Amino acid sequence: MKTKQAAIEQKVCPLEFAVNAISGKWKIPIVWQINEGKKRPSEFLKGIGKVDRRVLNQQLKEMEQSGILSKVSFPELPPRVEYSLTPLGKELVKVLWQLNSWGELFLKENNDS
């Protein structure tokens, strides 16, 4: 995965860079769920359904690396980890709500045809 600095140096299109950050089958469902508040990985597994634990952990790690999520590890037994949205992640939620509105319009247009 490219670092933020490497992407900036290569003059990547901002839209392409943003879409790559949220590409992946489970990233948008993760953001929708975490928008409700802090979540533990087991809560994502219950809420999303068919996601594999390994895939979920990879997607969470990628979103943490890109600055969308923050992770807090608690020094207790058994280990506990919680994820939450960063300020950047909260801005993404706003964009996803707009995309959701466009999706409703798109569905209506395609169902009316």
Image (cartoon, grey):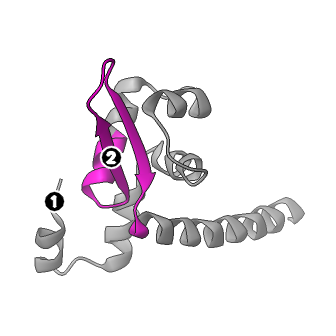
Q: Where residue 78 sits: x, y (%)? A: 33, 18
* Horizontal side, residue 13 vs residue 92: left or right: left
Q: Where residue 95 sits: x, y (%)? A: 55, 72
- Residue bearing mark 1: 2
Amino acid type of the residue that numbered disc 2 sits on in the rendered structure: Lys
Q: How many marks?
A: 2
Q: Read off the magenta span.
A: 59-88
Residue at image point 33% right, 46% down: 71
Q: Residues within 10 Å of mark 2 (few under 14, many from 20)?
A: some
Q: Secondary structure at mark 1?
A: loop
Splitting the image into 4 quarters, where does residue 66 fall? bottom left
Q: Secondary structure at mark 2?
A: strand
Q: Is residue 26 above or below residue 108?
A: above
Q: Where residue 99 sits: x, y (%)? A: 62, 68
Which of pointers 1 and 2 lies earlier in the amino acid sequence? 1
Dot label at residue 71: 2
* Horizontal side, residue 89 vs residue 33: left or right: left
Amino acid type of the residue that numbered disc 1 sits on in the rendered structure: Lys
